[in-house]
Image (cartoon, helix red, strand yellow):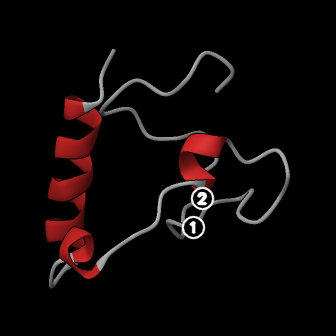
Amino acid sequence: MPDGKPAGVRCVQLGDDLRCAIFGKPERPACCSGLQPQADMCGNSRDEALIWLTRLEADTRP
């Protein structure tokens, strides 16, 4: 997404299996490769992790 990914919009690199198609590749954006997940970010379920990520997107929106 050359102009960045708006909050709440699914990344074009996210596959049907919910995995990043460019994980570990040089073209992966710095904002993605620089994100270092911590246990509190992941929570106890996928839903808890998505809530955390949604809040992070909102808090860092330009």
Q: Amino acid at mark 1?
A: Arg
Nearest the eye: 42 or 20:
42
Q: Are marks 2 and 1 in contact (CB under 8 Å)?
A: yes
Q: Whole-Å distance between the Cαs marked 2 and 1? A: 5 Å
Where is residue 35? Give x, y as percent: 48, 57
Q: Quadrant of the C terminus?
A: top left
Q: Amino acid at mark 2?
A: Gly
Q: Which mark is residue 37?
A: none
Q: Image point 23% across, 66% down: which residue?
A: 49
Q: In the shown orientation, is residue 21 left or right of residue 10?
A: right
Q: Image point 49% across, 28% down: which residue?
A: 5
Q: Which residue is mark 1?
A: 19
Q: Which residue is mark 2?
A: 15
Q: In the shown orientation, is residue 60 left or right of residue 30?
A: left
Nearest the eye: 12 or 24:
24
Where is residue 58? Give x, y as percent: 21, 31
61 over 19 or under it: above or below: above
Nearest the eye: 16 or 7:
7
Q: Image point 15% across, 55% down: which residue?
A: 51
Mark closer to the observer (2, 1):
1
Q: In the shown orientation, is residue 36 left or right of residue 4?
A: left
Which element type, helix, strand or loop, lies under badge 1? loop
Q: Residues within 10 Å of mark 2 (few under 14, many from 20)?
A: few
Q: Image point 27% across, 52% down: which residue?
A: 53
